[in-house]
Amino acid sequence: MAQPESLADLLGGRRAALDATVPPMVFVAGWLAGGRSIWVGAGAAIAAAVIVSGWRLRQGDRPRAVLVGLLGVCVAALIALRTGRAEDFFLVQIVTNAASALAWAVSIVIRWPLLGVIVGAVLGQKTRWRRDPALLRAYSRGSWVWVAQYLVRLAVFVPLWAAHAVVALGVARGVLTWPLVAACLAASWWVIRRSLPDGHPGLRHPRSGVDAHADGLG
């Protein structure tokens, strides 16, 4: 199986990770520097998000993706200002991780694993990968790694949020963003490679069920 690319090569995401790390950490820093003022923290986070968004646009990222990241920070800031609780800045992250874990798990159960959907779209395959039983199985197994990623975040974020641990939430947000995504990419790539049979042409070359059956007979 000749596959020089990894999932990290195909999916990227390093620049997008700035959206999830810089504004929350700046929020905590502003909150502390402002004498635990949510207004200062929120203003600092939004300013940081605007700067990151401008940098990402100059790097050639898609405007829609950049706008979603900026909007997420603005919504998080508004929630914290509305409730008057600094830890609620991280509620959006908690809710989105819970929703993501559920969505990925459901996608596996209904045999439309999201890892296959995303990689297939990136490679311009549409749904051809689903006609390859080996790829469908590999993407399903790899998708469970992503479910685990979201559950790990929830296991850390929810207790810290309940304990009003704002600083710890900021640190956890940084640690459990790109480092965890990188580990998830590596682990799911390893699972996919181990799941595909010897001689499979790889992610870029899905085989039909008929072709796979013929190869098995041969």
Image (cartoon, rainbow, N blue to C red):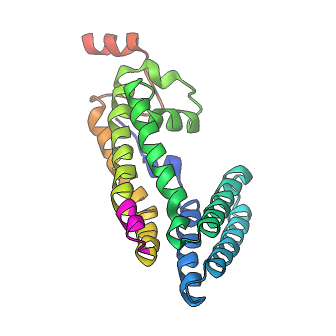
What is the x, y in percent for residue 169?
Answer: 43, 70
Q: Farthest residue toward the front?
A: 83
Residue at coordinates 53% horizontally, 23% vertically from top-left?
Answer: 127
Depth check: give the residue in front, 94 or 145. Answer: 94
Q: Quarter of the image holding residue 130?
A: top left
In this rendering, does residue 146 appear at all? Answer: yes
Q: How many marks?
A: 0
Q: Which residues are magenta?
A: 157-165
Residue at coordinates 31% horizontally, 15% vertically from top-left?
Answer: 215
Examine the residues drawn in magenta and state their main secondary structure: helix
Depth check: give the residue in front, 64 or 100. Answer: 100
Depth check: give the residue in front, 85 or 156. Answer: 85
What is the x, y in percent for residue 19?
Answer: 59, 64
Residue at coordinates 67% horizontally, 53% vertically from top-left?
Answer: 68
Depth check: give the residue in front, 58 or 49. Answer: 49
Looking at the image, residue 178 lies above or below residue 65: below
What is the x, y in percent for residue 150?
Answer: 40, 50
Left or right of residue 152: residue 44: right
94 is within the stretch colored magenta: no
Looking at the image, residue 78 lies above or below residue 44: above
Picture quarter with the N terminus = top left
In this rendering, does residue 5 appear at all? Answer: no
Looking at the image, residue 27 lies above or below residue 178: below
Picture quarter with the C terminus = top left
Looking at the image, residue 211 lies above or below residue 193: above
158 is within the stretch colored magenta: yes
